[in-house]
Image (cartoon, rainbow, N blue to C red):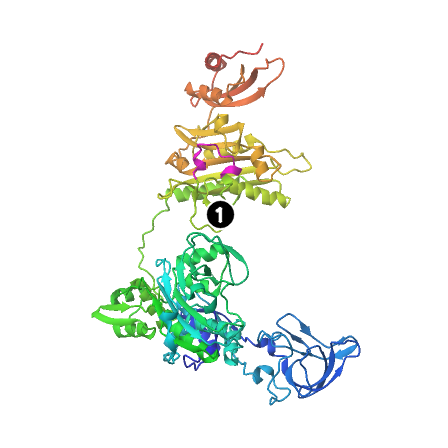
Amino acid sequence: MKISLNWLRQYVDIDIRPADLADKLTMAGFEVEAIINPYGHLSGVVVGRINSIKAHPNADKLASCTVDTGDRILSIVCGAPNIETGMTVPCVLPGTLLPSGTYVENSRIRGELSEGMLCSAAELDLGPNSSGVMVLDSALEPGLPLSEALGLNDTVLEIGLTPNRPDCLSIIGVARETAALLGKTLKRPDVFLPVGHGRITEMTSVTIEAPELCPRYAARLVTGITIAESPDWLKKRLVAIGLKPINNIVDITNFVMMETGQPLHAFDFDRLAGNRIIVRTPVEEKTFTTLDGKSRHLEADMLLICDAEKPVAVAGVMGGENSEIAGTTSRVLIESACFNPVSIRKTAKRMGLATDASHRFERGVDPDGTIRAVDRAALLMAEFGGGTLVDGLIDENPIPSPLKKIHLSITLLNRHLGTRLNREAIAGYLRSIEFSVTEDDPDTLSVIPPSFRVDVQRPEDLMEEVARLWGYNNIGTTFPRLSARTEPPKRGIEIKSNIRDLMAAFGFNETVNYSFTGINVAERLEIAKGDIRGNELPILNPLSETQAVMRTSLMASLLDAMQKNIFRQERDLKLFELGKVFFSNGPDRLPDETEILAGLWTGTRRASGWLEKPVPCDFYDLKGVVEALFTALGISGATFSRVPDAACSFTRPGHTAQIQYGQSDLGLVGEIKPSVLKRFDLKQSAFCFEINVNALIENLPDDISFAPIPRFPMVSRDLTLIVANRVEAGDILQAVKELGIDLVERVSIYDLYRGKPIPEEKKSITIRTIYRSHEETLEDERVNAVHQTITDHLLNRFAASLPA
């Protein structure tokens, strides 16, 4: 929001420097982002007088002029058709940059020296006229700076307003706050409507068919209008805040909108079929052409302003080209309405059309300000358009704005703000911004917010108003009373921190991603039908299509990170993320949230060097990481079993293991499917794991026991079995452990072989068993007996045989 100080001073006396005013507004919650000289581009432009004109020797449409600029005579080549000897014009001196980006310097144009430039109003950003050089008052002295000559000295404050303060999207709104901060009185413009002719109710009518979308619609009619340029003072006001003057009628609607914050629209009354207005949603209309000449798609819940036959505007957003003000317009119907903010916000977003009007309507306008704004506009149009006001006002108000009364406790206010303000001071601050305040009892004020403060709904809102008007910097610093006793961190927090440290120690880099993801992620990950990870929860107001649903897996984020790194030639990656996933329970219930640890490994097993060649990582590398993590956390005995092919989603069938501990399913580890990698534009293999952290924490031991280093030596025995290919090595190891033999300290896979002379449907597995006694040194006879027991058990259990 840009605020011209010259304009602001019309409504409040300002006796401090612009920089000081900017500080006060900023401290009151209105951040002043910049202090601008709106006419700074005119610093190199002076008043010039044309002394002589002669034809250009090398160009028929150009002329060589001598121009008096006060301290010197310049030779300037000009092609404007309206130049005359003795004319006073703006002269741009060399070294000046024009708003169009043109840099003016000494040059030769078709061989003739040109030491500056004579400009039109459009080239100086002072109006729409570009047909010729701008003509100035002949009484002006050559050499006078143009900004001084035209009275264009002004300062503009650029304010970054928060969405909850639509009342300050106007000059009067900021003037009201300024008056309160400076202890001044707000001066509103006087609106005394002259006596008109006729009756507006006999000439037009307004019908509201969708009152929930348009609770109020006011209109006035002005006849006998002459379309012309606006007066200089009006054009200056608009130019100062970045608006381009168009004509007197359109400029007045923009002026009143910026002055009052109430958007207006002017219809050519003679182009309205039936000379009446109907406010409704689309019936059969599918498209509508707006003022910018673009055809807009209409949806069933969009609000339209229509005449007796057709739409003439998209309510609160933009008018139509079928009823715009033209040079022949003589009768103008002025619209001043209050629309449903949600409806306007949705319409503007769907159409991709953001206007000054929609910016204000979607934040909420003053429902009681519609009449003041339409009266102000009608008065100005009658005065500066040469028109006559038609008597009467149309004011359709099917849903009046309710009166809000808020009870404010003085004690609670001081307790919440940390202040010691008395009742009179609090009431004074609120009255300074036009709140109605009465006393209920010595500790309670009854406050009615003005209609333009649509953001004030509860006592806390009133406390905020008092705090900012008294001054945030006046609130002393206090500290809450805290107990000296400290609580240990929650177990889950400590464990998750430990997991992150362990993963970093294993060489993995942590990634942190949004909890939102794209609607096509389940498809890209090939989530199996019936998998809980397919229960996605849509976001009601997504930031983008790539963040439209809550994530059900961390794997997509890790694969995206893998893609970005590989595209930057980083091919050896070890990544992990610890975060929540969300499983939908329907639109009306909160989702289930689960903490997940996910990891991804791609590239080589370890960095290559001169001692060894690079070796690609594989399934067992990542499985070893998971086992090392469990061991470090105190979990021993987790099992890894093959996942059925039909249950594999983004991991490769036959290369995926389910992780279980006791009766708990902890997650999975496996190789990512080539088809999934292709969907992420990846060409090198990758391995991943997902662990349910909630289930993992539930199974962690409360205490970790200590075992002394064994005093007696261990004895190892190897056993080679020939088993069917369907037998899993993990089942063999588990079968040994289930025997519960005390002397068995550890059992592991030592070798795996397929091929001749082993039959094709079988494989050879060698297991190594470590035996140890904590009481004595073992003798071969005892070890052999135990080993034979294990051998017999495995031969029977898995229908195995020994090698020949």
Q: Position of residue 16 (x, y in %)?
A: 44, 80
| Count of numbered labels shown in the rendering | 1
Q: Is residue 332 left or right of residue 148?
A: left
Q: Nearer the viewer, residue 76 or 746?
A: 76
Q: Is residue 474 visible?
A: no
Q: Is residue 530 magenta?
A: yes
Q: Position of residue 689 (x, y in %)?
A: 50, 35
Q: Quadrant of residue 174?
A: bottom left
- Establish if 637 lies above or below 587: above
> In the current view of this chain or complex, which residue is farthest to the top?
804
Q: Which residues are magenta?
A: 522-535
- The quarter of the picture where the C terminus appears is top right
- Establish if 664 lies above or below 4: above
Q: Position of residue 233 (x, y in %)?
A: 50, 80
Q: Amino acid at mark 1?
A: Gln
Q: Residue at x 28, y 70 (%)?
A: 420
Q: Is residue 210 visible?
A: yes
Q: Residues within 10 Å of mark 1 (few under 14, many from 20)?
A: some
- Establish if 633 lies above or below 283: above
Callout 1 secondary element: helix
Q: Quadrant of residue 115?
A: bottom right
Q: Is residue 784 left or right of residue 48?
A: left
Q: Nearer the viewer, residue 475 or 744?
A: 475
> In the current view of this chain or complex, which residue is farthest to the left?
441
Residue position for label 1: 547
Q: Nearer the viewer, residue 636 or 350?
A: 350
Q: Is residue 52 left or right of residue 329?
A: right
Q: Is residue 710 magenta?
A: no
Q: Position of residue 656 (x, y in %)?
A: 51, 29
- Establish if 351 lies above or below 777: below
